Image (cartoon, rainbow, N blue to C red):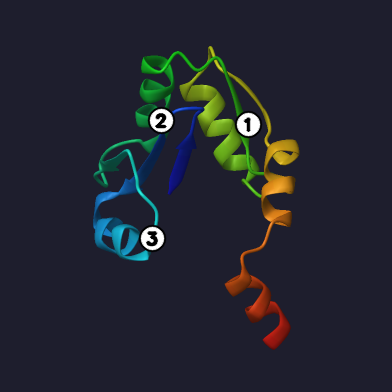
Amino acid sequence: MCALITETSLTFICPKFEDTALMGGLNIPVDDCIYWEEHECPYHILAALLSKLKCRKIGLNENCSFGHVISLQQAATYTMIGSAQKCLAPLRACKTSTELALLTCA
């Protein structure tokens, strides 16, 4: 599963067999979902989308596995890959009232 977030769009890349789980779990508007079949390589699908959107630099979640990073580097050789931690940390620090209530309860 991948969420490609740009300044203007949100696109999910997801295995086709997970489509109902993805759509059922989202409570936000999604610009696009791209599904891949088991015989397809999701890294090539993501690389093609990055090329189409002219993304030359991407930031990945710091919890992304080394194997995923290497596979993406091989598929998207023209794209510079780095960490999105500086962008994601402030977003994770903001909590909704529901999230705060859950944390208090826990």
Q: Residue at left 68%, top 36%?
A: 84
Q: Position of residue 4 (x, y in %)?
A: 46, 36
The one of 26 and 80 positioned closer to us in this rendering: 26
State the residue at coordinates (37%, 42%): 13
Instruction: Name the residue tied to disc 1.
Output: 59
Q: Return the residue found at the far bottom.
A: 105
Q: Residues within 10 Å of mark 3 (few under 14, many from 20)?
A: few
In 3D space, how far apart are the residues under numbered discs 3 and 2 (Cα atoms)?
Answer: 23 Å
Residue that appears at 25% across and 51% down: 16
User: How many numbered discs sit on the rendered protein?
Assistant: 3
Please state, as top left, top right, bottom left or bottom right, where the C terminus lies in the image. Answer: bottom right
Residue 46's disc is 2
User: Does residue 106 appear in this view?
Assistant: no
Please tell me how crowded label 1 is: few (under 14), some (14-19), or many (20+) other residues with Cα within 10 Å.
Answer: some
State the separation of the CA atoms marked 2 and 1.
13 Å
Q: Nearer the viewer, mark 2 or mark 1?
A: 1
How far apart in space, not on screen, are marks 1 and 3 (Cα)?
24 Å
Q: Is residue 90 left or right of residue 78?
A: right
- Dot 1 or dot 3: first in sequence order is 3
Amino acid type shown at disc 1: Gly
> Residue tagged by mark 3?
27
Q: Nearer the viewer, residue 48 or 102?
A: 102
Specify the amino acid type for callout 2.
Leu
Secondary structure of the residue carrying tag 1 is strand
Spot occupied by residue 58 in the image (x, y as percentages of width and height): 59, 26
Say which amino acid is labelled 3. Asn
User: Picture coordinates of residue 85 (x, y %)?
Assistant: 73, 40
85 or 78: nearer the viewer: 85
